[in-house]
Amino acid sequence: MTSRRTIDPAGAVFGLAIPLLCALAVLILTAAWEPRLPAEVASHWSGSTPDAFTSPMTGAWTMALLIALVGGGCCAIAALAQAQLMMRRYMLVIGLAVTFLMATLYVATLTAQLDVSDSSDAPFPAWSLGLGMCLGIAVGWLGASLLRDYRERPPATTTPDPSLPRGSVELPIVDQVGTGRPTTAVLALLVLVPVTIVCLLMGSWWPMAIAIPSCFLILSLLRFTVRVDEQGVSVRNLGASALDYGLDEIIGAKVTETRPFQDWGGWGMRIKRPNRYGLVTNTGPALVITTESGHELTITTDRAEEMAGAINTLADRRA
């Protein structure tokens, strides 16, 4: 089925309403606590020592604007029903992680300064960094699972070109692409080892509170399950379907060789131009699918030949 819906209700709630509510909560909470706060509150720390101060409401407005513009700006695409679903999910999780990180950190810093006359000795609440990131990822993950793909899906009017591969294989064909265990271990070490050194030099563990949740989030966003069956092609990520092309809309499938950085400018989910997407995680064979709506999807997989043959053979049966 096709839909002309322009706003995804779940995306509007999680991508627009939640960041704005977090920004509003910062303002309301600061106004309510202002009588219990010093005239100037600590707004920045160098290590564990405050080195910048501002009035409570000035700090609140600054943080509220940052939450709305930075966090909400990342999340806003989640509300666009016709935008690419996987990209909407990515940006929602990342945006809410940033939103909750900033909101939780700000509330924790105010809490540490309640009922004190001098904020120059206020401790830096490092624990709030990890808590905020984890809360944001959890809420973002929930919102991402509720997003739906409302793009238009016109049915294919032709069968695949005779020159494209055919094959008779046992379905479904499933392949895990992205970061495997060795790559995951290497990426984790590349992040955690430098952060550990920084923590030792600073004598504080708070950088790790950001690094561990961030590393978990990044690695989760780089693992995909590709499936080809009688229904078409689907890609799962974050525990939900991220890409879904029905067999009735596919014009054909071919095999090509691709290089993530040279051909796509990076690794992971890529957009080369409108409606041309790439899920490129390694150099080598790739499955390329085209649809009646003009979408072209490239997926790097060692089973590209099998998948293309199966898709074209199934599509031939539409005639």
Image (cartoon, rainbow, N blue to C red):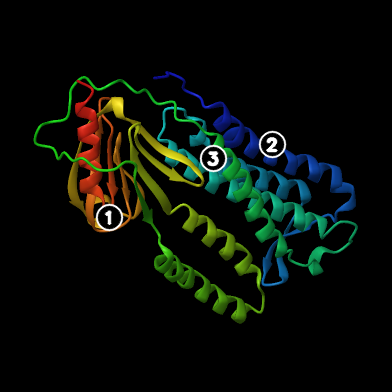
**Occupied quadrant, residue 150:** top left
Q: Where residue 7 appears, x then y in whole percent?
A: 51, 24
Q: Where residue 18 appears, x then y in whole percent?
A: 65, 37
Where does label 3 land, which residue?
Answer: 144
Where does label 1 land, which residue?
Answer: 260
Q: CA distance from mark 2 to mark 3?
A: 18 Å
Where does label 2 land, which residue?
Answer: 21
Q: Where residue 135 appears, x then y in whole percent?
A: 66, 50
Q: Residue flagged by tag 2: what amino acid is it?
A: Leu
Secondary structure type for disc 2: helix
Looking at the picture, does residue 89 appear above or below residue 190?
above
Q: Residue flagged by tag 1: what amino acid is it?
A: Pro
Q: Is residue 295 left or right of residue 76?
A: left
Q: Nearer the viewer, mark 2 or mark 3?
A: 3
Looking at the picture, does residue 32 appear above or below residue 192?
above
Q: Earlier in the sequence, mark 3 or mark 1?
A: 3
Secondary structure type for disc 1: helix
Q: CA distance from mark 1 to mark 2?
A: 39 Å
Q: Residue at x 65, y 73 (%)?
A: 205
